[in-house]
């Protein structure tokens, strides 16, 4: 079974803090994704990575950055957390071998971040 | 542009009733993939099904069934004889446009299903 883990289930930070959210997958997947989930808006893609050290912006990258130094690990960084970044953050991975659109994304349990 | 619409925000049913979740999508591609995910209260999205645009056969898996109709751009999901454990948020998703090589997904807003005993 695919296993995607996220470093924290719940996180509370102060405005202006630098926040790191970690995601690890154990299936040697090429692609990894970071989403945020807000009520009524579904999941919105923040960033994704298709290889080590390679990244692409998603639909809402402002205020975020990412790092992928190893294939299994994909980090989301909030350089200076703000209250409007309070949300549920979900990480996903997919194999990247089947070609465009076919690969199923597998999700981690999510991190509920509150910025005070 | 890719778009997925789940018009039902919340559906409440009593156990053993059937419930149908609507999903309407927009795409200009001829080849695309559709997905359904379930998000129970624990938070993790669980993959349920993937369907490609060339396969319009309906699918049944236990109490779950899916009705894909290309003519109406719909991919609806029915839970038969609902149970309390079916209470969750259900998301429909569409694969990215032809220019996307990375398998990005466009998600709908989700439908909350509440099953009461």
Image (cartoon, coloured by chain):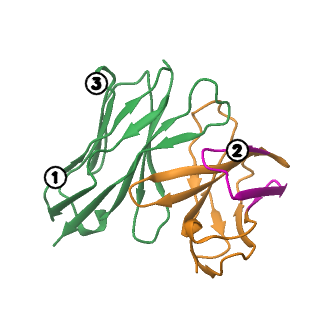
Chain colours: A orange, B green
> Pointer 3: what residue?
B72
**Of residues A58 and B95, the one drawn nearer to the viewer in this rendering:** A58
Q: Is residue A30 magenta?
A: no
Q: Position of residue A18 (x, y in %)?
A: 75, 73
Q: Which comes before the other along the chain, label 1 or label 3?
A: 1
The label on residue A57 is 2
Q: Which residues are magenta?
A: A55-76
- Element marked by disc 2: strand
Q: Is residue A72 visible?
A: no
Q: Quadrant of the C terminus of chain B?
A: bottom left
Q: Position of residue B24 (x, y in %)?
A: 33, 35
- Element marked by disc 1: loop
A73 vs B28: above or below: below
Of marks 3 and 2, the one in the foreground:
2
Question: Tag 1: Cα neighbours inside 10 Å, few (<14), some, or many (≥20)?
Answer: some
The label on residue B18 is 1
The chain containing the residue under callout 2 comes to: A
């Amino acid at each position: 079974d695919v296993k995607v883990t996220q470093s924290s289930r719940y996180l509370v930070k102060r405005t202006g803090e630098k926040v790191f959210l970690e995601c690890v997958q154990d299936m040697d997947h090429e692609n990894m994704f970071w989403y945020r989930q807000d009520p009524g808006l579904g999941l919105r893609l923040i960033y994704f990575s298709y290889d080590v050290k390679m990244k692409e912006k998603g639909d809402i990258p402002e205020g975020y950055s990412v790092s992928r130094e190893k294939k299994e690990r994909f980090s989301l960084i909030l350089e200076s957390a703000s209250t409007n970044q309070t949300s549920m953050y979900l990480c996903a991975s997919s194999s990247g071998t089947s070609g465009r659109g076919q690969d199923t994304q597998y999700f981690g349990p999510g991190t509920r971040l509150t910025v005070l | 542009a890719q778009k997925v619409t789940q018009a039902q925000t919340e559906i409440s049913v009593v156990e053993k009733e059937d419930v149908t979740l609507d999903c309407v999508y927009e795409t200009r591609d001829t080849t695309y993939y559709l997905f359904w995910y379930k998000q129970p209260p624990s938070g993790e999205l669980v993959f349920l099904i993937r369907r490609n645009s060339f396969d319009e056969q309906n699918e049944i898996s236990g109490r779950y069934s899916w009705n894909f109709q290309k003519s109406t751009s719909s991919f609806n999901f029915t839970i038969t004889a609902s149970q309390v454990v079916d209470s969750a948020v259900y998301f429909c998703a569409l694969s990215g446009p032809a220019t996307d090589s990375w398998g990005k997904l466009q998600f709908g807003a989700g439908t909350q299903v509440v099953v009461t005993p």
